[in-house]
Amino acid sequence: SLGSTTPPIMREVKLPLNLSDSEVWPSHIFSVAGTCVTRLLMGPACDKFGARIVTVCVLWISAVPVAFTGVVQNAAGLNALRLVIGFAGGAFVTCQYWSSRMFTREMAGTANAIVAGWGNLGGGAAQIVVGSVLFPLFKIIYRAGGHLDEVHASALSWRTVCILPSLATILVGIWILRASDDAPRGNYKQLKKAGWMPEVKVYENFKYAALNLNTWMLAIQYACCFGVELTMTNGAASYFYEIFDLPTEQAAAIASIFGFLNIFARAMGGFSSDWINSMAGMRGRLLPPTPLLPPPGIMGIIFV
């Protein structure tokens, strides 16, 4: 959800900075690029250190640039900021790794899907909380003294509104450290020390996965679905206020609907995968994506 704190207020960012659409759009690409690189590293990191520590590191590292959103002065600064904020997307991998570690294969699909659904729902929640709740609230607070007009209150609001999501993320990281374990039997450090878990050979594991054809088949499939979702999350609010001339608050609220769909769609995907796996095994898990991928692609073509 940290990656979705900037898109709902993007119009408020680009107007005072005099940025054109062609200067703003690369920041979305940088955000996705940061997510892709971090996700690639999260698997080996979780194998080595466990999901708990890695998740907290990703959240805290990403929370810092979110808090400093207000210091952006130009397109280059916006690109750099969103690149680092995009690292937060790596937490998705750590969560999936974590839930797979905690649940048996008979229900891993459902568990992963519920975790992913609630996690991606955070993208929708960030849109509506930042764009439709906190941003107008900050404007009201700044105008309450009577010293700022609408324009200056809006400018000050977008420069400070992202501090709250950043602080919330830091608190969540503290809670994770204090209240969770890497695996059902405890944390990796203790398990290795007790001799219950062998030391992981990270490079060999990564090499094996990278040279496996199934990895790349799933990667292409995932790019076709989640890659489109990231693009929609980044651009939805901008689309609604540019095409339909909606205010930031309304555009962000409508854009959040796309993220909220995850709580239903992801959970159903995991449940159906587990159900087919119980009857047809691993090969059965390959069946649901086949009919589900073409319709969004067709709708995308129609939309364009």
Image (cartoon, rainbow, N blue to C red):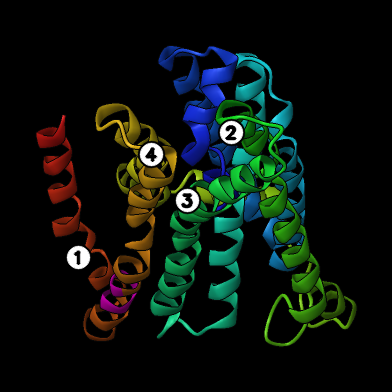
Query: Residue beneath label 4, please?
Result: 237
Q: Is 276 left or right of 228, judged from the image as shown?
A: left
The kind of residue tagged 1 is: Leu
Q: Earlier in the sequence, mark 4 or mark 3?
A: 3
Mark 4 or 1: the one toward you = 4
Please provide percent x and percent y for residue 69. 68, 34
Foreground: disc 3 or disc 2: 2
**Which residue is more in the foreground, 251 or 90?**
251
Q: What residue is shown with label 3?
A: 132
What residue is shown at x 38% (from left), y 39% (from top)?
237
Q: Which residue is mark 1?
A: 287
Q: Position of residue 256 (x, y in %)?
A: 39, 53
The verdict on residue 47 being magenta is: no
For residue 154, the mark is: 2
- Secondary element under disc 3, as helix, strand or loop, is helix
Residue type highlighted by circle 2? Ser
Establish if 223 lies above or below 137: above
Circle nearer the N terminus (3, 2): 3
Q: Indicate which disc, 3 or 1, sits on the residue closer to the N terminus.
A: 3
How dense is the environment of label 4, judged by Cα within 10 Å: few (below 14), some, or many (20 and up)? many
- Marks 3, 1: nearer the viewer: 3
